[in-house]
Amino acid sequence: MKIAIFYFSGTGNTEKVAKAYKQYFEEQGNGCELFPLPQKEQVDLTQYDLVGFGYPIHSFNAPQIVLKFAKSLPKPKKGDKRVTMAFIFKSSGEPVKMSRVSSLKLKKILKRRGVYVANEYQYVMPYNMIFRHTDHTAYRMWETAKKLIPLDCADILNGVERHEKKMPFGGFLAWILRCEHWGAHVIGVGYRATKNCVGCGICANNCPAGNIKMKNGKPKFGGNCYICARCSFHCPKDSIRIGLLNGWRVNGAYSFKDGDPNEKNGHENYCKKAYARYFKEAEERINSAAETADKQS
């Protein structure tokens, strides 16, 4: 089977998931290509047996760059009944039920282009904005995702469909929250670099929107921001201030190595029940799959 995965990753979480998908598919004897967004060249989906789309959830929606890419895909020619099978995976800092609506717009766009989404999954990964998770929490999130991904990929390859449960007024809520897309352009203009900036240009080189230009050795921010936080998160001098969102700024990549389970960060009660439910359900599914495998061996 030939598989293509198109994904957008702001600071690396979704990319880690995409690479784990690729590894599993290839271990099962399939060909798998990764296409990080934005893509400058048109890709013919008909060359692939299966297509995946990955993204971090932004305000309970797919990022604008992902929707733009989906809209760029050609619609089937009249009379062409061919359907491209697809799956979606998402990363998010919290496992709340509202995240189910994030793919509604994307799936609607894909459907018009002859793409049927048969599987959909979400993985909880550490925040790159709002607050910084402890090393132990980030480690636990990634270790859980690594155990879930093979199970999810197996479902995809075996034709076992997995769909998100519908939410009352989900489409309406998602539509309202997509105000982030135009709001991001306004907020991004307010980004600034402090005197700590050394003019390395990492932010400009890594900006997926091409929104940052270097001028007189300093970054200048335009009005095409996706507020993905890539520039501030990876700044080696922690010098970028992200306008109205600066109180949520997180700087520096996670090591994903285990840390002190007793470490506190002041946010221990944030979505506490949702996190507990996510890890409990994940553990149950992982253990159930292990028991089934033991019985079959």
Image (spheres, grey):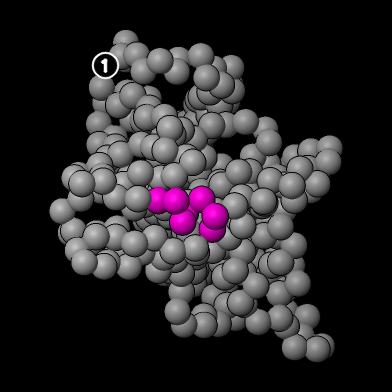
Q: Which residues are magenta?
A: 185-191
User: Residue at horizontal 18%, vertical 58%?
Assistant: 199
Determine if the magenta segment contains residue 189. Answer: yes
**Viewer-closest of 25 and 109:** 109
Q: Amino acid at mark 1?
A: Asp
Position of 48 with respect to 146 (left or right) is: right
Q: Quadrant of residue 258?
A: top left
**Residue at disc 1, secondary structure:** loop
Residue at coordinates 56% horizontally, 47% vertically from top-left?
Answer: 58
Residue 52 among magenta residues? no
Residue at 36 percent of width and 18 percent of height: 265
Residue closest to the eye, 201 or 91: 201
Would you identify the image quadrant in which residue 267 lies? top left
Closer to the camera, 226 or 288?
Answer: 226
106 or 114, nearer to the observer: 106
Residue under numbered circle 1: 260
Q: How many marks?
A: 1
Q: Position of residue 180 (x, y in %)?
A: 61, 50
Whether residue 183 is visible: yes
Where's residue 12, x and y in %? 36, 50
Q: What residue appears at the point 25 percent right and 31 percent down from the top-left corner?
A: 257
Q: Residues within 10 Å of mark 1 (few under 14, many from 20)?
A: few
Query: In this view, which residue lies farthest toward the bottom?
Result: 78
